[in-house]
Amino acid sequence: MFRLFYIARRSVTLYGTVNDIFRALTPNKNYEDKYVLGVYRSDNDLAGIVYIVRDFPTDGEWIIGLMLLKADERCNGLGAMVHKALIEWAINLGAKTFRLGVMQDNYKAISFWSRLGYKKIKEVDMEFTAKSHVIDVMRLHLCSGFDFAGK
């Protein structure tokens, strides 16, 4: 069992410090567009964190900037459950699609997001951590009839 709680409305940069999670802003967005959510186990232990930005890069499209679970919380279905809760919550706030970026050499992440129904829409080159990376940009169209099991 888990609970998803709103932590703060702030923006995040990829691979930044904890303070960056709350302070940095996505281009052309403000703090009202950014949600930082904590994923808590029933014993109140923090199991993960999610940040998501509404209406970026276009209206109705929300970008998942980070969904990070503790290593011992992975591969047990929690990621899919958190994703389901995000979809239900975001649809109620007007989301039509989710978008995210995954480093092309992160095969486990690409497999996870693909199983949830995400499709690659393009590749982009990005530089961070003093290296160049190829990023697969993926999108999921949301609808009220979505199969939350990801099948």
Image: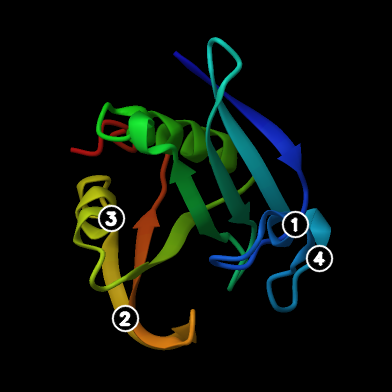
* Disc 1 target residue: 19
Q: How far, Cα to Cα, is label 1 from label 2?
A: 30 Å
Label 3 sits on residue:
109
Which of the two marks, 4 or 1, is nearer to us in this view?
Answer: 1
In the image, what residue type sits under mark 3?
Ala
What element does badge 3 sit on?
A: helix
Disc 4 from disc 3: Cα separation = 28 Å
The residue under label 4 is which amino acid type? Answer: Asn
Of callouts 1 and 2, which one flags the residue occurring earlier in the amino acid sequence?
1
Q: Which residue is mark 4?
A: 30
Percent x, y of residue 32: 81, 55
Number of other residues with Cα within 10 Å of mark 1, as a class: few under 14, some 14 to 19, many 20 or more: few
Where's residue 64, x and y in %? Answer: 51, 56
Locate residue 132: give its quadrant: bottom left
Q: Nearer the viewer, residue 105 or 54?
A: 105
Which is nearer the N-term, disc 2 or disc 4? 4
Q: Earlier in the sequence, mark 4 or mark 1?
A: 1
- 33 is higher (above) or lower (below) than 92: below
Residue 41 to residue 39: above or below: above
Q: CA distance from mark 4 to mark 1?
A: 16 Å
Q: Residue at x 19, y 61 (%)?
A: 107
Q: Which mark is residue 122?
A: 2
Q: Amino acid at mark 1?
A: Asn
Q: Residue at x 62, y 67 (%)?
A: 13
